[in-house]
Amino acid sequence: LSDRLQKTFKNITGKGKLTEKNMNDMLREVRMSLLEADVNYGVVKDFIARVKEKAMGTEVMTSLNPGQMVVKIVHDEIVDLLGTQDAPLNYKAMGLTTIMMVGLQGTGKTTASAKIANVIKKKQSRNPLLVACDVIRPAAIEQLKTLGETIGVEVFSLGVETKALETAQKAMAYAQEKGYDTVIFDTAGRLHIDEELMQELQDIKAYVHPDDILLTVDAMTGQDIVNVANSFHEQLDVTGLVLTKLDGDSRGGGILSVRAITNVPVKFVGLGEKIEDLDVFHPDRMADRILGMGDILSLVEQAQEKMDMEASAKSANRMMNGQFTLTDMLVQYEQIEKMGSLGGMMKLIPGFSQMAGQIDEDKADSKLKKSKAIILSMTPEERENPSILRASRKNRIAKGSGTSVADVNRCINEFEKMKTVMKQMSSMAKGGKMPGMGG
Ligand code: GDP
Ligand code: MG
């Protein structure tokens, strides 16, 4: 997270209201952050516009401060763009399922082919065949054969003398004959897109009719990924993505661009060179990573703590002098409400979301909200000195707060009880004794 973003974030966090001005500041920094994470310029532009529209139309919840609101909207929007977590392979109900791996050279096609063969064999009891359609270099065939041996999956190859298309055709016949249920075609890549490669891939596609065409996207690639994804998708209609090398320290924003272009799901994630280093895609974790969210969350907490401490300190000071008023009670209620917003924050953290859902916030919330509304409907004078509250004033307050006179009485009772406790605590703190305690 850039220093500038941190600074802007601190500024906006301290303020009570989401204005166009502080929101623009915040979004400018979000934009910088996304560009730093290698998200494509055009994608960022659309994204920011959408977030802004959403944020402006959203009422700022009292339990969230504006900074939290913006972060939540930005985060949710990125998760949305990244798409679903649950994107299985398109298995045929009957017959041979075929998967074609495509992508630039070195992005991890061969490695991913073996990883996928391994995982579907082990976890889904499939019977896969790997096919070496990268026939340009002998080393490429050897690489796949070695991987196949490690995982106990047969690799079909006719060597470098046979063209890729013919290899694919013979492999299909071979798979049918031997009773395989899944065929994974590892194809050739180039450093840059070229016509010849695209033609070769299209020919294989036309013959095989793959159920899945998976484009490998290296997490470390930058802006040019947009052109690459565009070409592959335009000419081959890819059905899924494999995000590779996510174990590196890049923020991996390129995947946002590719998602925006192709709108196909990320089906697998590569997390290392070893066969087991394969995972399903977690959009919320990825959003955190692209945004540097871990940092942002801790910033929110720090700012929140500071605000709470300042308000409590003032209120505590007055209480210690035996001056507890309805205004102080309001501060207390607001503290409690802010804790409630922790529930909202928890929902952002994977694993905690279920817990947050279990808390029956509604009941406790509605009582607290009523009391808050009642105090807010009082004049400053009434808040300082509730003994002046007669029937007509209570009526006015009930109406103003959308509650009943009984609710107003309950609120005042609660206040009187709290005030008594505060008085006792205050005299105790000043060296007096706790009533009812001997010695
Ligand atoms: P291909 O040219 O597209 O077939 O790419 P390869 O599968 O041969 O991979 C290129 C290099 O990237 C190899 O050295 C792989 O070991 C490495 N590689 C592939 N996937 C990952 C990954 O998820 N993480 C890391 N760290 N390295 C990977
Ligand atoms: Mg390869």
Image (cartoon, grey):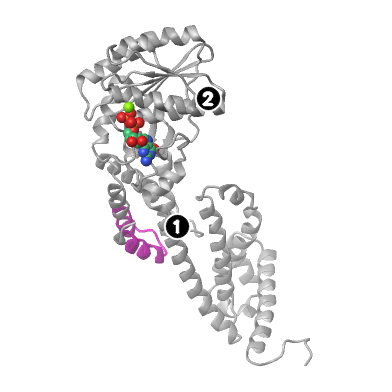
User: Which quadrant holds the C terminus?
Assistant: bottom right
Q: Is residue 12 magenta?
A: yes
Identify the amino acid type marked 2.
Answer: Lys
Identify the amino acid type marked 1.
Answer: Leu
- Is 114 rendered above or below residue 36? above
- Is 347 rendered above or below residue 201? below
Res 414 → quadrant: bottom right
Q: Position of residue 24 (x, y in %)?
A: 30, 55
The image's mark for residue 319 is none
Task: Describe residue 436's horizontal placement relative to residue 273 as left or right.
Answer: right
124 and 288: which one is in front?
Answer: 124
Q: Residues within 10 Å of mark 2 (few under 14, many from 20)?
A: some
- For label 1, the residue is 297
Q: Secondary structure at mark 1?
A: helix
Q: Which residues are magenta?
A: 5-28
Do we see residue 57 in this rendering?
no
84 and 417: which one is in front?
Answer: 84
Task: Describe residue 309's horizontal placement relative to residue 419 as left or right.
Answer: left
Q: Quadrant of ligand 2?
A: top left
Q: Secondary structure at mark 2?
A: helix
- Is 315 rendered above or below residue 352? below
Q: Earlier in the sequence, mark 2 or mark 1?
A: 2
Of labels 2 and 1, the one closer to you: 2
The image's mark for residue 121 is 2
Ligand 1 within 8 A of label 2's CB? no
Taken as a whole, is the magenta stretch helix, strand or loop? helix
Q: Position of residue 286 (x, y in %)?
A: 42, 44
Q: Position of residue 63 (x, y in %)?
A: 51, 59
User: Which quadrant holds the N terminus?
Assistant: bottom left
Q: Position of residue 241 (x, y in %)?
A: 38, 30
Do we see residue 61 in this rendering?
yes
